[in-house]
Image: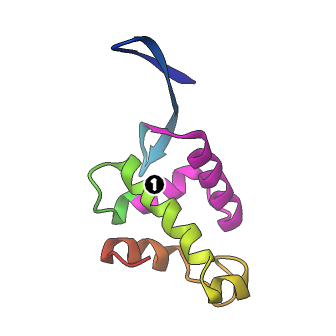
Amino acid sequence: MAAEFRSGDGLSRSTLVNRNVTVNGHRTSMRLEPAMWDALDEIGRRERMSVHDLCSLVDGQRSQSSLTAGMRVFILSYFRSAVTESGHQTAGHGRGGAPSMVELVSSLEAGRP
């Protein structure tokens, strides 16, 4: 659902979509662009993890100021690692020589995708 807000020239609609997620057993909400939600759903399918599990994993390792920011960085890092030469060769995280989810999330904390 898109949120509405007032701007200087009238009523505008946000393109962000709000969803509830459970992070380490606690319910919270995140607002992400539809493309980010699609990417997160795709990562979940590829890794056989729920969005909730992915959010919990990132939350435990993030250094960003918010869970939403941490998830955006995670999504970007996930797909950036897939476009490396080794990522193209293995064609899938969690299989072959691609980094594991824990390795990928840990690399976010260290600042290296």
Q: Is residue 103 left or right of residue 95?
A: left
Which residue is denoted by mark 1 in the rendering?
72
Q: Residue at x 65, y 67 (%)?
A: 47
How far across and down, in percent of the image, does residue 75 sit?
Answer: 52, 60
Badge 1 marks a residue whose secondary structure is helix
Q: Which residues are magenta?
A: 30-58
Q: Which one is in front, 64 or 33?
A: 33
Towards the viewer: 87 or 102: 87
Q: Residue at x 40, y 77 (%)?
A: 107
Mark 1 Cα shell of 10 Å, populated few (<14), some (14-19), many (≥20): some
Residue at x-position 43% and y-position 47%: 25
Observer-nearest residue: 62 or 49? 62
User: Could you tell me residue 1's position as x and y percent?
Assistant: 57, 24
Residue 44 placement: quadrant: bottom right
Q: Where residue 90 sits: x, y (%)?
A: 71, 86
- Picture layout, residue 28 above or below residue 56: above
Q: Is residue 31 magenta?
A: yes
Magenta stretch holds residue 34: yes
What is the basis of the colouring in this image? rainbow
